[in-house]
Image (tube, grey):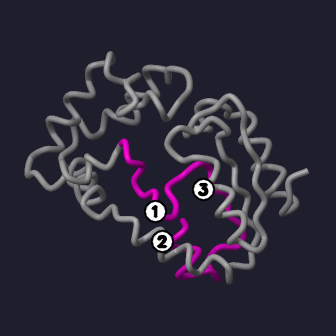
Amino acid sequence: MQILMARRPERVTRVVLTSCDSFERFFPPLFRPLTALARVPGSMWPLAQALRLRALHRLPMALGWVAKRPIPQEITDSYLGPARTDRGVRRDLRRFLRGVHRRHTLAAAKAFPTYRRPVLLVWAQEDRLFPVSLARRLERLLPDAELRLVPDSYTFIPEDQPTVLADLVIDFTRSGRVT
């Protein structure tokens, strides 16, 4: 979304960004080894299969630092399952991981001072992957940005605090501001 905001701002009238990659933090340090792993041919299949082990899901390098509480099994399966069974999904995952580089988010950030549309930044107050300092930097750069911190949540705010997020988005959608 940040790249679209920077390159084609006329296509976006209003934006909600939840805790996310930005500036030099694309990827968070914990996940950077995945970009190197993606350069190894055939590496996505064993990675996807290893994540069948539910005991791994709560580790920081899996889902442990993205959601404060365990994500229900059926939801976790919807996130991780397609990579286990679909070669096309693994191919796309590998392509994405190989393309991850902070130059993309840094370039987008350079254009933010000219982005004049409302932006709501909904950030997890306890985020371990994307510190609140990133949200504050975004808020300073974006002329019409508003930051709301969500307590009792990590990165996946839709998992940890879905009602809070929904209320903020609805309010923002209706008015362009959060009351």
Q: Residues within 10 Å of mark 2 (few under 14, many from 20)?
A: some
Q: Residue at x 52, y 74 (%)?
A: 108
Q: Earlier in the sequence, mark 2 or mark 3?
A: 2
Q: Vertical placement of 2 versus 96: above or below?
A: below
Residue carrying label 1 = 24
Distance between mark 2 and mark 1 Cα atoms: 6 Å
Q: Is residue 107 above or below residue 56?
A: below
Q: Residue at x 78, y 59 (%)?
A: 146
Secondary structure of residue under mark 1: loop
Q: CA distance from mark 1 to mark 3?
A: 9 Å
Q: Position of residue 120 (x, y in %)?
A: 73, 58
Name the amino acid, label 1.
Glu
Name the amino acid type tagged 2. Leu
Q: Residue furthest left?
A: 41
Q: Residue at x 31, y 49 (%)?
A: 32
- Name the quadrant of the N terminus: bottom right
Q: Earlier in the sequence, mark 2 or mark 1?
A: 1
**Label 3 crowd bin: few (<14), some (14–19), many (20+), radius 10 Å:** some
- Residue 19 horizontal/vertical position (percent): 59, 48
Write down the residue under mark 2.
Answer: 106
Q: Are marks 2 and 1 in contact (CB under 8 Å)?
A: yes
Q: Which residue is mark 3?
A: 134
Q: Is residue 33 rendered to the left or right of residue 138?
A: left
- In reply to whether residue 21 is colored magenta, the answer given is yes
Is 150 or 10 nearer to us in this picture?
150
> Would residue 153 appear left or right of 44 to someone viewing this image?
right
Q: Position of residue 8 (x, y in %)?
A: 56, 82
The amino acid beneath tag 3 is Leu
Residue 170 coordinates in the image, percent (x, y): 79, 49
Q: Which residues are magenta?
A: 1-30
